[in-house]
Amino acid sequence: MQWLEFPSPQVAVRGQVGAPRALLHRLPEAQRGAFPVDTWERLTMSAGIRLAFVTDSPEVAVRLECLKVQHPPGFCDVYLDGHYWSSFAGEWPGTFEPAVLSGLRGVHGVELFMPAHCEVRVGGIGVAPGAQVAPPAARARPLIVFHGDSITHGSRSRRAGTSYPARVARALDAEFINLGVGGTARGEPGMAAAIAALPADLIVLAFGVNTYGSACDPPVRFETIYDRFLGTIRAARPQVPIVLVTPLFHARETQERNACGAALEEYRRVIRQVALRRESFGDRRLVVVEGFGIIGPGDEDRLADHVHPNDQGFAAFADRLVPVLRRILPPA
């Protein structure tokens, strides 16, 4: 095969902030110091990053090196002309060169979804000798920035293209950046600043469970954290709609309290209160979406464990969020 070096002007890298880089960290290295070590480690995972190009090659391969695995990465996905085509995986961690497409005729748009829980370096894109490769034609599409915990990151989704941010973006024909960080979405100032710096048309925030669980900040402290997080974004993006998703149904929540003695519902209440207070001071571009309306009591079959949605749950998340976002998404 003929191998294109990477990064290449012939291949668009979607979902990666800053200039294209072979090491598929979601944020540039220069921002590392703004994050705790564990959060930055999650941001080195390639969740939501896609390699996109147009080619007449009958065969396509990709050279990948997986440097570090957080959880089982699941399958990478191949989308052909905007539709799911196939999946591939390798021995993670390690280096491999899968043939991801073969036997094609004509010119096609190819989009390769990288794994959510693997630190990946791209070594090149392989095509047939003499084949033409070009980046996708530029067109106006709204940009949605997602931030949240492991559910936004894509935990328990078996395929890279079936996380709820990916499903939502396809349904709305939108570009997206996934800044979900499993286990470390604690409302950190560095993350708020990173989101505020992006030219988003819509922002979706879905965090609070990590504060309830691993961080164990009490609700009164979470209220300060959440309000400051929103304030940082609002100061830079005063007109951008922000959707605030309260925590989804937790199968054990009626029986459990965290180490602070608080129930998960208390953290949902904080999000509602912060939004209501900001709305009362004139912020009319906040929209609260109740997590119970996405996955609630009775939806246990949509959970992979007591917290995380399974693939059916991710589909429900997207299906129930898309109508809300469609109503408030500004035209491109």
Image (spheres, rainbow, N blue to C red):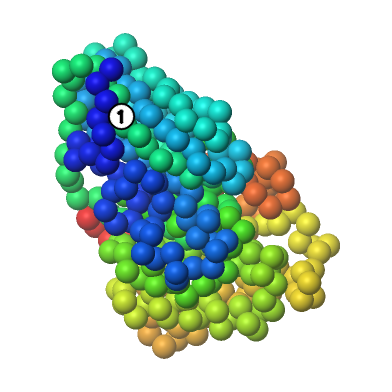
Residue wearing tag 1 = 125
Q: Nearer the viewer, residue 288 or 57?
A: 57
Q: Is residue 272 left or right of residue 112?
A: right
> From what the image shows, is residue 171 above or below residue 134?
below
Count of numbered marks:
1
Residue 23 makes an appearance in the image: yes
Please state the horizontal and vertical placement of residue 208, each as a whole percent of the image.
60, 67
Q: Is residue 272 left or right of residue 218?
A: left
Q: Is residue 109 left or right of residue 194?
A: left
Residue at 63% across / 64% down in the picture?
A: 210
Please state the horizontal and vertical placement of residue 16, each as a whole percent of the image.
35, 51
Residue at 35% across / 19% down in the picture?
A: 101
Q: Residues within 10 Å of mark 1 (few under 14, many from 20)?
A: many
Name the element at disc 1: strand
> From what the image shows, is residue 204 above or below residue 222?
above
Residue 107 makes an appearance in the image: no
Look at the image and tell me in which quarter the C terminus lies. Answer: bottom left
> From what the image shows, is residue 328 above or below residue 313?
below
Please state the horizontal and vertical placement of residue 51, each as a whole percent of the image.
32, 38
> From what the image shows, is residue 129 above or below residue 295?
above
Q: Amino acid at mark 1?
A: Ile
Q: Which residue in the rendered view is the most extreme toward the bottom?
A: 281
Q: Which residue in the rendered view is the most extreme toward the right?
A: 255
Q: Nearer the viewer, residue 169 or 28?
A: 28
Residue at 67% across / 76% down in the picture?
A: 217
Q: Nearer the viewer, residue 316 or 48?
A: 48
Q: Is residue 15 left or right of residue 38?
A: left
Look at the image and tell me in which quarter the N terminus lies. Answer: top left
Residue at 58% across / 81% down in the picture?
A: 223
